Amino acid sequence: MTTMTRVEKIKTAILRLSEEEARALRAWYEERDAQQWDAELEADVAAGRLDALADDAIRAFQAGNATEL
């Protein structure tokens, strides 16, 4: 089975959901997506991939080019 075939089957099944089922699916997917994003961000932080961005932001703030939130 190709990936597109699986995706098409999923799309068809989603279109058959009731509004309540669609809301439940949306809530589940949003939570799953947020958890994945958090895990990716944590991995990037742990690996130091965001250090340069943090340093730039600190320098901009110290130079008066940013404001506190």
Image (cartoon, rainbow, N blue to C red):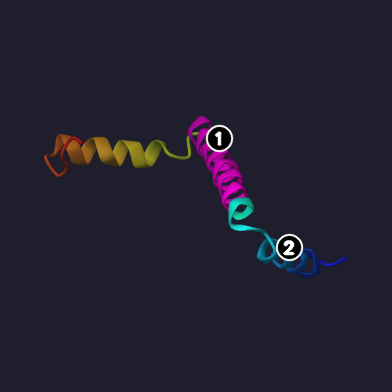
| Mark 2 surroundings: few (<14), some (14-19) or many (≥20) residues within 10 A | few
- Residue at 31% x, 36% y: name it: 55
- Residue at 58% x, 57% y: name it: 19
Q: In this view, does 28 lie to the left or right of 66?
A: right
- Whether 37 is among the magenta residues is yes
Q: Is mark 2 on a helix, strand or loop?
A: helix
Q: How far apart are marks 1 and 2 (CA)?
A: 34 Å
Please name the amino acid that badge 2 sits on. Answer: Ala
Q: Which residue is situated farthest in the top direction here?
A: 46
Q: Residue 43 carries which label?
A: 1
Q: In this view, does 50 lie to the left or right of 43?
A: left
- Residue at 13% x, 39% y: name it: 63
Q: Where is residue 61 in the image (x, y as percent from the top left)?
A: 18, 37
Q: Quadrant of residue 22?
A: bottom right
| Mark 1 surroundings: few (<14), some (14-19) or many (≥20) residues within 10 A | few
Q: What's the magenta region?
A: 23-46
Q: Please tell me which residue lies in front, 51 or 38.
A: 38
Q: Mark 2 points at which residue?
A: 13
Q: Which of marks 2 and 1 precedes in the sequence?
A: 2
Please name the amino acid that badge 1 sits on. Answer: Ala
Q: Please tell me which residue lies in front, 18 or 30.
A: 18
